Image (cartoon, rainbow, N blue to C red):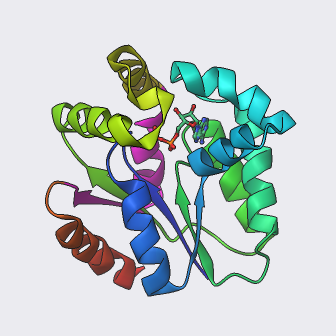
Amino acid sequence: MKNIVLFGPPGAGKGTQATLLKEKYNLIHISTGDVFRFNIKNETELGLLAKKYMDEGDLVPDEVTINMLKAEVEKNADANGFIFDGFPRTESQAEALDVFLTEKEAQINGMVALEVPEDLLVERLLERGKTSGRTDDTDEGKIRNRFNEYNTKTAILKDYYQAQGNYYGVNGVGSIEEITNRLAEVFDKL
Ligand code: ADP
């Protein structure tokens, strides 16, 4: 089983690349942001809860997110492996994921991180906001708050996976195809 955390700040291109790589490697792509948005659209209890955090660009509480992630993994019990996109985003989430996978006699094979300068990210998010219908992408203040959440809670996960010898940084600037090729070089080794 191959389990990969696709990592990077908001707007780094995780979703775009995961969609291409899941086909190539026959993995299940779990985007926590997409699962939350699906729940918001369908007005589920989880959606109602997540919405107030997401609208502000705040992280959804760990317990809620971790339970949701576990349920998504359980839905795909016979998968060949997973690409986790948008999870973990805090140290507690990373620890919970390790415990959960160990129980399943599995592990994270690597964190593959898309590295993109912040100026370019804001530009990409505002551009996406014009067509995506995502309210968290149309307001620069909300975007800044997401970076603040990323910098204070999520960026440290680089150290967490580096300590396990599992961190791989990839240059996330370039064409979609160039970046897919760079990521695939790392995926092939994992
Ligand atoms: P982006 O990477 O562009 O910020 P996502 O779709 O990954 O977009 O996430 C959108 C929002 O969903 C986040 O700002 C946050 O509110 C919520 N979210 C997604 N994943 C998590 C997570 N692992 N923990 C907490 N909140 C999350």
Identify the residue shown where x is 32% and y is 48%. 12
- The x and y percentages for residue 118 are 22, 33
- The x and y percentages for residue 66 are 73, 45
Up-down: is 55 above or below 124?
above
Quarter-of-image position of residue 78: bottom right
Q: Quadrant of the N terminus?
A: bottom right
Quarter-of-image position of residue 50: top right
User: Can residue 9 be seen by looking at this rendering?
Assistant: no
Quarter-of-image position of residue 178: bottom left
- Magenta highlight range: 153-172
- The x and y percentages for residue 46 are 80, 37
Identify the residue shown where x is 61% and y is 78%. 81
Q: In this image, 99 relative to 128: left or right? A: right
Ligand 1 - quadrant of the structure image: top right
Q: Quadrant of the C terminus?
A: bottom left
- Viewer-closest of 53 and 94: 53
- Viewer-closest of 105 and 85: 85
Up-down: is 154 above or below 171?
above
